[in-house]
Image: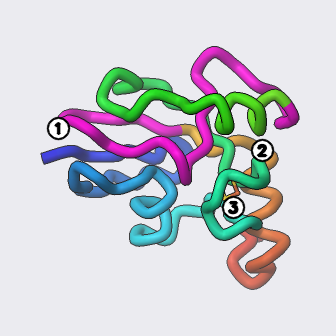
Amino acid sequence: MATVRFLEQDLVVPAKVGQSILEVAQGAHAPEGYACGGVCACSTCHVYIEQGRELLSEASEDEEDILDKAFDVRMTSRLGCQARIERDGEIAVRISRESLDAYYNEHPDERPK
Ligand code: FES
């Protein structure tokens, strides 16, 4: 089994091979944005994979192109809707500021006080 830990939300979520990080986030109500609906056309699902990068699908050229336009891109950056779990293990995810802002703009009632 795979597990995904959302570091700043203190959430540890069981996950299955084949799921994207965004799908796992949505199932756990983790605040990850998804303005384009998960079709690799925005960067609001931008996350940092702090552990378990090797358990995920490789980034496609399309994903790299979108990440080029994202904010605060790091070596660990991925688009949550494109990064799919390919192997069991532990994955640790930090949701980017850009993604948190996108999520809370869409879900203002959930914004931490
Ligand atoms: S939700 Fe838009 S690229 Fe992932």
| First reached walking from the N terminus: tag 3 or tag 1 | 3
Q: Amino acid at mark 2?
A: Arg
Q: In the picture provided, is 69 more to the left or to the right than 94? A: right
Crowding near pointer 3: few (<14 within 10 Å), some, many (20+)? many
Residue at the disc numbered 1: 88
Quarter placement of the C terminus: bottom right
Mark 3 = which residue? Answer: 33
Q: SS for tag 2?
A: helix
Q: Nearer the viewer, mark 1 or mark 2?
A: 1
Q: How far is disc 1 from disc 2 in space, using C-alphas?
A: 27 Å
In space, the residues marked 3 and 1 are separated at their CA atoms by: 25 Å
Q: Is residue 16 above or below residue 68?
A: below
- Total numbered labels: 3
Residue 84 quadrant: top left
For ligand 1, give the image quadrant: bottom right
109, above or below 58, in the image: below
Amino acid beneath label 3: Gly
Residue projecting furthest to the top: 75
Residue 39, quarter of the rendered image:
bottom right
Task: Of the two numbered discs 1 and 2 on the same chain, state the one appearing first in sequence.
Answer: 1
Our reading of the magenta stretch's main secondary structure is loop
54 on left or right of 78: left
Residue occupied by mark 2 = 97
- Residue 74, position in %: x, y? 70, 19
Whether the magenta-drawn stretch holds residue 75 is answered as yes
Pick whichever, 75 or 37, lies toward us: 37
Determine the residue positioned at 68% across, 37% down: 62
Nearest to the observer: residue 36 or residue 3: 36
